[in-house]
Amino acid sequence: MMELISIRDFESAAREKLSAMAYDYYRGGSFDEITLAENDAAYDRLRLYHRVLRDVSERDLSTDVLGSRISMPVLVAPTAFHQLAHPDGELATARATVAAGTIMTLSTLSNCSIEEVAAIGGPLWFQLYVYRDREATRGLVERAEAAGCTAIVLTVDAQVWPTRERDVRNRFHLPSGLQMANLMPSGLDEIHRSDSDSGLAHYVVSLFDPTLDWSDLAWLANISTLPVVIKGIVHPDDARLAVEHGAAGIIVSNHGGRQLDTSVATIEALPAVAEAVDGRLPILVDGGVRRGTDILKALALGAKAVLVGRPILWGLATNGQEGVGQVLEILRKELDVALGLCGCRRCDEVDRGLVADV
């Protein structure tokens, strides 16, 4: 087996271990996967103006996000069905995240329950899909708060489901023995094989609430005291609305290129969102982060931190908890090098002047 020294190496190794259905589910985007590719390529187009002759002998990557002090500005993004990658599923991911000193965001569609993952310790956010069954949705929020989660991450870009062609061809479904533990025994916990489509697409169209709107932030505030982070913002006007409606944070996201194809790459959307928010709440960004220089570019353009999803899954598939830890450590070391080579000692020293005009 080749030596695994980069995120790309871990993806290659994971592909050898995963079933074709699981790999395509994790890797794929919607339609022609243009946005999926652009999320990566947009980072590559950005150029850094490094600074020199500064004392960078000691560097500190730590930062604060919504009251949690974390060891680096890298969080684990919400991704579904970790047991497709490894039998320990989200438990392995959570253990590695805690060891790395950062925050995991647990998906509504996880194979391990909120309570199981929260019991591992460390700060935990819960990503929420809103179901047509609002009582089931309320139950998820109440369980997250009771388990000790410190934020709700409301996904707002999944009210309509696109064609994910890889999943259609594979007739994506959950293999026997895998369920969505957060939704048991409500009857919302199984994704069945379809003869003509992705089972997940059928599940979402049938059960997710397409009426979700800005008034639902008030509804969430009434059923929970947890701060609500809005995930799925790319337009500056929506960023302003998020501030006006009481969001605690924004995640600039296009769902990893899995929703609206030809949507703007997240790193390209970030500067306008940051300008619209004007420091009134923290901004995070996901999609396409594969190198430490990507993280630094995101910080320079207005993000407090980044979230990574697919790289975590590649680590999990390759080597379970240890693999996730290795992926996070690669990103930590690469960011540390990038920070020093740009003449910065701390994340809050990274500024817009380090990145060429976009």
Image (cartoon, helix red, strand yellow):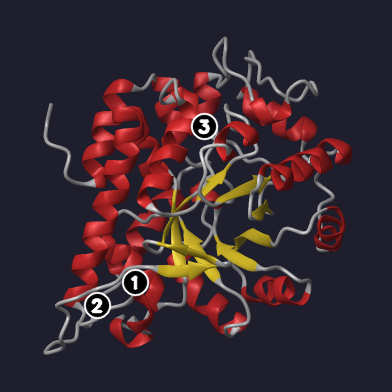
- N-terminal label among 3 and 2: 2
- N-terminal label among 1 and 2: 2
- In this view, the residue in front, 246 or 263, is 246
In the rendered image, the residue lying farthest to the top is 176
**42, above or below 323, in the image:** below
Secondary structure beneath label 1: helix
Position of residue 126 measured from the top left corner of the image (x, y, whole percent): 63, 47
Q: Can residue 82 be seen by looking at this rendering?
A: yes
Residue with the mark numbered 1? 297
Q: Amino acid at mark 2?
A: Leu
> Label 1 neighbourhood size at 10 Å, few (<14), some (14-19), many (20+)?
many
The residue shown at (80%, 41%) is 137
Q: Amino acid at mark 3?
A: Glu
The residue shown at (12%, 36%) is 3
Residue with the mark numbered 2? 48
> Label 3 neighbourhood size at 10 Å, few (<14), some (14-19), many (20+)?
some
Q: Quadrant of the N terminus?
A: top left
Q: Amino acid at mark 1?
A: Lys
Viewer-side label of 3, 1: 1
Residue with the mark numbered 3? 165
